[in-house]
Image (tube, rainbow, N blue to C red):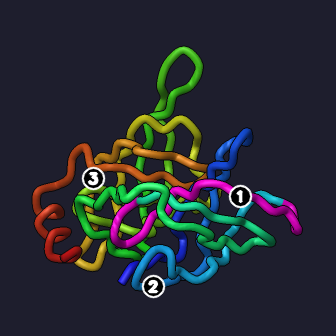
Amino acid sequence: MIAVPAGTTLTLRCPGEPDLPLINLAEVQANFVTELPPMLVLSLDEQGTRRYGILELVTSAGVTWVEAELRDGRLTVTGGLPTDVVQRRGAARKPGTYTANGTAQVESGPGRRLVPVSGHVQDVSTGGLLLRGAGPDSPHLPGGIKRALLHVDMPWGVMTAAVTPVEQIADQLRGSYEWIDPADSAALREFCP
């Protein structure tokens, strides 16, 4: 079974246009990628806009690329896989909402500076996490994050980890662990089977 969890960031690449980031609003499941039902997504397009392109599809099984159409906030897989390539995840992701705060090192002008960050971790694995900004002073993450030291409220207690960004789009940051407390690493392995 293949699942695309709610909150997943997808990217639609249309010829001659900039890449379009999309947020999946509700989980969808199917036995095969080509059988996925239309996905309700959040995009920056106006109502009535129609786009075709290659979708970078992030699923529970990994990442693949497939032909897709975006129309009126619904994303539909329209064709077969252009290749048989599926990049398998090194670690299973566990969705949830875990409060996080910490400090980020941000590129600014001639150097780097430290800024406070807060938000929610929306999925976690033994390899990294997805952080969405949601602070009281600023609901967004600062741009240009080079690394962050985060304290995440997990079911077993506070997990402390240094995270290096893999991708940052709008108020979401997907990162891999640069360092994680050894006790938290062991608890994470049990938490994410």
* Label 2: which secondary element: strand
| Circle 1 crowding by C-alpha within 10 Å: few under 14, some 14–19, many from 20 | some
Q: Which residues are magenta?
A: 46-63
**Does any portion of residue 152 appear in the rendered image?**
yes
Identify the main secondary structure in magenta: strand
| Circle 3 crowding by C-alpha within 10 Å: few under 14, some 14–19, many from 20 | many
Q: Earlier in the sequence, mark 3 or mark 1?
A: 1
Q: Position of residue 176 (x, y in %)?
A: 31, 49
**Does any portion of residue 138 appear in the rendered image?**
no
* Label 1: which secondary element: strand
Distance Cα–Cα, label 3 vs label 2: 34 Å
Of the residues shown, which amino acid type is indicated by label 1? Tyr
62 inside magenta stretch: yes
Q: Position of residue 21 (x, y in %)?
A: 63, 54
Of the residues shown, which amino acid type is indicated by label 3? Ala
Distance Cα–Cα, label 2 vs label 1: 22 Å
Q: Which mark is residue 23?
A: none
Q: Earlier in the sequence, mark 3 or mark 2?
A: 2
Q: Is the N terminus in the top left, top right, bottom left or bottom right quadrant?
A: bottom left
**Which residue corresponds to the image point at 11% horizontal and 63% vertical from the top-left?**
183
Quadrant in the picture for residue 25: bottom right
**Which residue corresponds to the image point at 29% horizontal and 46% vertical from the top-left?**
162
Q: Select label 3 or label 1 by which is in front.
A: 1
Q: Which residue is mark 3?
A: 161
- Side of 185 relative to 99 (left or right): left
Of the residues shown, which amino acid type is indicated by label 2? Ala
Quadrant in the picture for residue 78: bottom right
Q: Which residue is mark 1?
A: 52
Distance Cα–Cα, label 3 vs label 1: 39 Å
Seen from the viewer's position, the closer of residues 95 and 184 is 95
